[in-house]
Image (tube, rainbow, N blue to C red):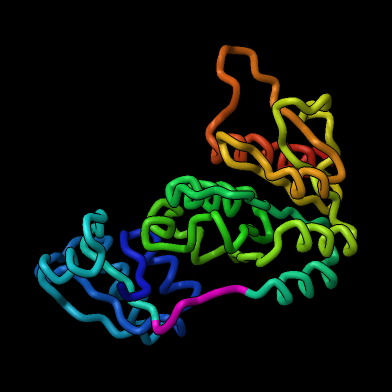
Amino acid sequence: MKNISYGLHSSLAAIQQHPFHIQEICLLEHRQDKRIQEIKDQAVTNNVHCRSVDKGELEKLCGEGNHQGVVVIYKEQQTNSEAVLLEHCAKATSPLLLLVLDQIVDPHNLGACMRTAEAAGANAVISSTRNSAPLTPTVRKVACGAAERIPLIFAKNLARFIDELKQLGVWVYGTQPTASKLIYEADFTRSVALVIGAESAGMRRLVSEKCDELLKLPMCGEMASLNASVATGIGLFEAVRQRQMN
């Protein structure tokens, strides 16, 4: 399958943020509403080619996905480099906020985490290359444009990459239900990486051992854990709260 994204939000974000990565935009023929016109206008502004296609071609491109009448076809797979992120971290003049995902395999969870991270003003999302969801059209769709706005880094060795972040002064918090410290007791005003593990298994042992501190959410009901994207939201927006109060 071609490297694509679909849906109104993600397509508009792609045109505005990375028009040079786009091969063409496929639009549902005869659809002439305000939102499609906005995409057409942005495409003209950013010199992106648009092509009218029938419903069958759109469905062939994105399968059962809800394309909303628009599909973006990229020139090639866009990936972000570990080295580039580390260089950015080394040169940062304000506290960093990074989201690290360990073994998040559900593309809907990855997309939701990226959307939350972008909304919280995080600098990047880091995931592992193994046992993790790749950047798929479903991820882009669920992210609602965040996949085009926030870097997603796939680390070959997540534990080693965490070590490299720590060497650059990034404090690493891991989330674990058995931790003794609440997430609200942590200091998020410095450069921080928040590690979220898989819902069932949590963080892998080696990743957990690399964290500077382990934190937990105050679970008051019968549930043992939360959806990964919900936990991400609670953690990242605690960082937002502290930084705005500081």
Image point (49%, 66%), residue name? 148
Q: Which region shows up in magenta? A: 75-80
Which residue is at the front of the view, 32 or 63? 63
Work out whether 49 lies above or below 54: below
Image point (65%, 75%), residue name? 81
Residue 71 relative to residue 207: left or right:
left
Q: Position of residue 82 (x, y in %)?
A: 70, 71
* Quadrant that contains the N terminus: bottom left
Residue 191 relative to residue 152: left or right:
right
* Quadrant that contains the C terminus: top right
Image point (74%, 53%), residue name? 97
Residue lying farthest to the top in this orientation: 221
User: Image quadrant of residue 178?
Assistant: top right
User: Image quadrant of residue 63?
Assistant: bottom left
Image point (55%, 54%), residue name? 131
Residue 244 relative to residue 34: left or right:
right
Residue lying farthest to the front in this orientation: 205
Which residue is at the front of the view, 93 or 62? 62
Q: Position of residue 187 (x, y in %)?
A: 85, 39
Residue 132 relative to residue 3: left or right:
right
Residue 138 is one of the magenta-drawn residues:
no
Q: Position of residue 192 (x, y in %)?
A: 80, 50
Which residue is at the front of the view, 91 or 134? 134
